[in-house]
């Protein structure tokens, strides 16, 4: 089976999911957000991981969709905290309705995620649920750290990597691990799947930082330079602050402290500083390092090589993506 078949099964599942009817203000925002699509990366990873160990991958579709519903729940709440006006090019739920509705609808999505996870067969359910609960808490920890960093003048590379691991990578790790659990994989194989997801997730987020500066706006799907305009403490900025000296340091400090500025000019100036300091090359090396670690863990997985083909290709697509 190919990724196309897995995605088709997922889309059919999402098309038939019902979240509730009354009051409509509670459930319509869920249908709205889920209909905005997305690449379904996480549930695809769950199904691919299940298919490593069994041909009966269809039993992973509903639990895999739980991971996607949970992911969208976090997006709905993150958008409120970030005061984001758009999600996938459309108004965010709190903009289209209001914040209170977005909070409650998000809460119902979390309940729905638990409901879908109950489709994991009984003998494997407890492990799947225990790992999900830990992951869900870690995602919240990562979001809180991200908000804490906004009010700090300095953040270390290690702190930043830990934050993105919690906020982004642990859910990718769980998505793969859940597939292993459903597929009847050993504890060791499940641990390796988690390791693959963590490393791919770290590379994925660092690639996102890179694309925010150097991406093609047509392909990236959002404003390039948004992180620079907002002084967001990304890997790129943290490395630049650490490495800048002399006039380069003065220039970087000027743009970081400027209150009144032309956004295009600031993006151009800070990108120029990154170029001078070789930040792009540093980031690319870090991304490749995490990707290599993920592939190494995949190579250690005791599964026939032909079964790994889809997951390997999917991982490569995530790291090399332009959107």
Image (spheres, grey):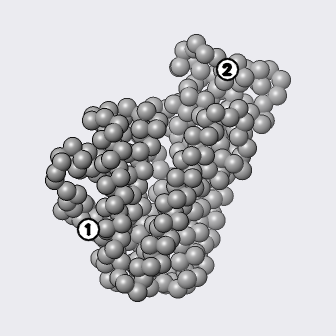
Which secondary structure, mark 1?
Answer: helix
State the residue at coordinates (71%, 24%): 252
Name the quadrant containing residue 301: bottom right
Coordinates of residue 164 in the picture (x, y in percent) = 59, 51
Judge whether 20 appears above or below 218 on screen.
below
Q: CA distance from mark 1 to mark 2?
A: 50 Å
- Residue under numbered circle 2: 257
**In the rendering, which numbered label is found on residue 74?**
none
Front residue of 243 and 93: 93
Question: Closer to the N terminus: mark 1 or mark 2?
Answer: 1
Name the quadrant containing residue 270: top right
Front residue of 310 and 31: 31
State the residue at coordinates (57%, 14%): 261
Tell me if residue 319 can be seen: no
Image position of 12 (left or right of 197): left
Judge whether 44 appears above or below 221 on screen.
below
Within 10 Å of the Cα at label 2, are there few (<14), some (14-19), or many (20+) other Cα atoms? few
Q: Quadrant of the N terminus?
A: bottom left
Frontmost of labels 1 and 2 is: 2
Coordinates of residue 221 in the picture (x, y in percent) = 40, 38
Image position of 207 (left or right of 112): right
- Residue under numbered circle 1: 9
Front residue of 102 and 185: 102
Q: Quadrant of the C terminus?
A: top left
Coordinates of residue 20 in the picture (x, y in percent) = 19, 56
Judge whether 179 appears above or below 274 on screen.
below
State the residue at coordinates (64%, 65%): 293
State the residue at coordinates (52%, 59%): 137
Within 10 Å of the Cα at label 1, are there few (<14), some (14-19), or many (20+) other Cα atoms? some
Front residue of 277 and 169: 169
């Amino acid at each position: 089976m190919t990724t196309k078949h897995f995605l088709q099964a997922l889309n059919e599942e999402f098309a038939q999911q019902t979240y509730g009817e009354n009051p409509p203000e509670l459930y319509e925002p869920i249908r709205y957000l889920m209909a905005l699509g997305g690449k379904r990366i996480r549930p695809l990873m769950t199904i691919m991981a299940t298919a490593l160990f069994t041909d009966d991958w269809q039993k992973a579709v509903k639990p895999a969709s739980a991971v996607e519903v949970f992911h969208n729940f976090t997006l709905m709440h993150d958008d409120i905290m970030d005061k984001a006006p758009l999600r996938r090019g459309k108004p965010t739920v709190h903009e289209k309705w209001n914040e209170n509705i977005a909070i409650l609808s998000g809460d119902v999505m979390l309940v729905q995620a638990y409901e879908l996870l109950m489709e994991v067969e009984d003998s494997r359910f407890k492990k799947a649920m225990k790992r999900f609960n830990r992951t869900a808490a870690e995602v919240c920890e990562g979001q809180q750290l991200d908000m804490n960093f906004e009010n700090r003048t300095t953040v270390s590379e290690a702190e930043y990597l830990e934050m993105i691991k919690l906020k982004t990578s642990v859910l990718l790790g769980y998505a793969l691990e859940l597939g292993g659990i459903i597929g009847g994989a050993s504890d060791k194989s499940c641990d390796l799947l988690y390791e693959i997801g963590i490393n791919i997730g770290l590379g994925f987020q660092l690639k996102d930082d890179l694309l925010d500066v150097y991406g093609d706006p047509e392909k990236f799907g959002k404003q390039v330079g948004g992180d620079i305009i907002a002084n967001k403490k990304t890997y790129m900025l943290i490395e630049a602050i650490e490495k800048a000296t002399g006039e380069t340091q003065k220039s970087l400090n000027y743009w970081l402290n400027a209150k009144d500025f032309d956004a295009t000019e600031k993006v151009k100036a800070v990108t120029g500083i990154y170029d001078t300091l070789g930040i792009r090359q540093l980031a690319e090396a870090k991304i490749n390092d995490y990707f290599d670690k993920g592939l190494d863990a995949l190579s250690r997985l005791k599964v026939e090589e032909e079964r790994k083909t889809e997951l390997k290709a999917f991982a490569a697509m995530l790291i090399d993506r332009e959107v």
